[in-house]
Amino acid sequence: MKLKRWLALLPVLLLGVSSLLVARPVDRDDDRPPALGATADLSTAPRVGVDRPKPTFMLHERDKRVHGLKPFQTLVDAAPAGSTLRPPPGNYAGPVVMTKPLVIEGAGSVTIDAGDRGTVFSLQTDGAVLRGLHLTGSGDSHDTDDSCLDVRGHRNVIENLVVDNCLFGIDLKQSNDNIVKGSKVRSKPRDLGVRGDGLRLWYSHRNLIEGNEISDSRDMVAWYSHDNVYRRNVGTRSRYSIHFMFANNNVVENNRFHDNSVGVYFMYTEGGVLKNNLISHANGATGMAIGFKEASNAVIEGNEIVYCAVGIGSDLSPFQPDSKIWVRNNRFAFNGIAIKLTSELGGNVVTDNAFEGNLTNVVQAGRGSSGLNQWRGNYWDDYQGFDRDGNGTGDTPYELYAYADQIWIELPPARFFKTAPVLELLDFLERLAPFSSPELTLKDEQPRFRKPQQVKAGVTG
């Protein structure tokens, strides 16, 4: 009986041993990286379907306003691939799924309405052009990412669209080298946290996002998306103007972001340029113009940062060893805190900026880390030195110490009382006759004596 049992188990044992032999790496040097992995070229990898299947809605399930409208899908199906479709002006019923390259010219007089169910338009091809369309009336399901426009292809041009009454506005997934230009996007009128993103990139690279207006949405977000350019856009009344997550080497230039909770946030990123933007009125408990979370090697240059709770908030950034974050030629004006550093890693290089009218210019939360960052050639409106030789540089270094400020720096809830008379009096007494050692926040050896002339940042042209 025992022999029969062993014979019965023999095929299973042989299968297990063979699988181990196959899985075992043969003659591989542990110091040599494998052929595939982070350095693999995946640019020609096939598309992987990641969308949850879109549900099908009967006409009676859609809003009555679309009953009796001609389906736009009929026009798309009848147009030959590669042709130009100029539909007659008017309202049409969605949804639309386009799987062939077409040029659709709406001339600003064509509306496609999905009747508040599902996704309005799904672009599933390469090399198409959508221009001058009004897309409206998506569903409100986050499970199926109901949107006005799904882009699932490469080298498409999306231009001069009006997108409104949609959960998600324009949603790109695994879509590269597209142009999204001159469009106006607005979410459904929902509470901020349950709106969809006005513009979302997911695993999408080298796209140009230019001249768009994103308002009253949740975020403009880029996940795992590299080498994209955001230029001359306007973002307002949303949560994040742009939120980068694991997204490297993106360029954000000449945009205007105002009245959002956060301007531009770099989270777990490497590389990236934020240049010549105007970011203002990022207020509230979490208000911040520019944020870093474990980010490295970013350049912040030529921006105007005004009327924000925090101008730059940096948490464990730069993160990678021997990396830096360069902050240069920016204007920080009338903010609560111009720059707030909450780590002791150092590596920030802050040069040739102008600090004026801020309640607090710089906060360094870590102890003993003032010498790990570089401060050089900045203009400080509270500098108390002279320029006797007239060379434009202060005769003595600018030194910023934390006196009574240490209270609210170490106990953030006390920040509410920062300008209260009792704390102001305590700070005055500390400066007059310190009864505790003040903390050196920064030292600028070559402070500018006169405010530098700076080019107006924001949307131009």
Image: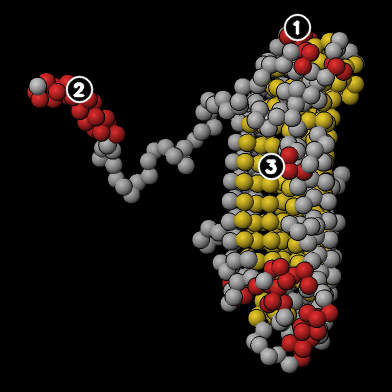
- Give the crowd class for mark 3: few <14, some 14-19, many >=20 residues within 10 Å: many
Do the numbered discs 2 and 3 sit on residues whose CB atoms are within 8 Å? no
Q: In terms of depth relative to the viewer, which is nearer, 413 or 254?
A: 413
Checking the image for residue 27, the label placed there is none
Q: Position of residue 362 (x, y in %)?
A: 72, 71
Q: Which residue is mark 1?
A: 78
- Give the crowd class for mark 2: few <14, some 14-19, many >=20 residues within 10 Å: few
Q: Position of residue 441 (x, y in %)?
A: 67, 76
Q: Position of residue 65 (x, y in %)?
A: 87, 18
Q: Which residue is mark 2?
A: 11
What distance separates the C-alpha of mark 1 from that of mark 3? 35 Å
The kind of residue tagged 3 is: Val
Q: Mark 2 or mark 3: which is in front?
A: 2
Image quadrant for the N terminus? top left
Mark sitting earlier along the chain (2/1): 2
- Residue at (13% x, 25% y) in the render: 6
Q: Which residue is mark 3?
A: 221
Query: Which quarter of the figure has residue 125?
Result: top right
Q: In terms of depth relative to the viewer, which is nearer, 132 or 193?
A: 193
Do the numbered discs 1 and 3 sit on residues whose CB atoms are within 8 Å? no
- Give the crowd class for mark 1: few <14, some 14-19, many >=20 residues within 10 Å: few
The kind of residue tagged 2 is: Pro
Mark sitting earlier along the chain (2/3): 2
Q: Mark 2 or mark 1: which is in front?
A: 2
Q: How is the image coloured?
A: secondary structure
Q: Mark 1 or mark 3: which is in front?
A: 3
Left or right: 267 in relation to 65 = left
- Residue at (42% x, 37% y) in the render: 36
The kind of residue tagged 1 is: Ala
Element assignment for label 1: helix
- Residue at (83% x, 60% y) in the render: 306
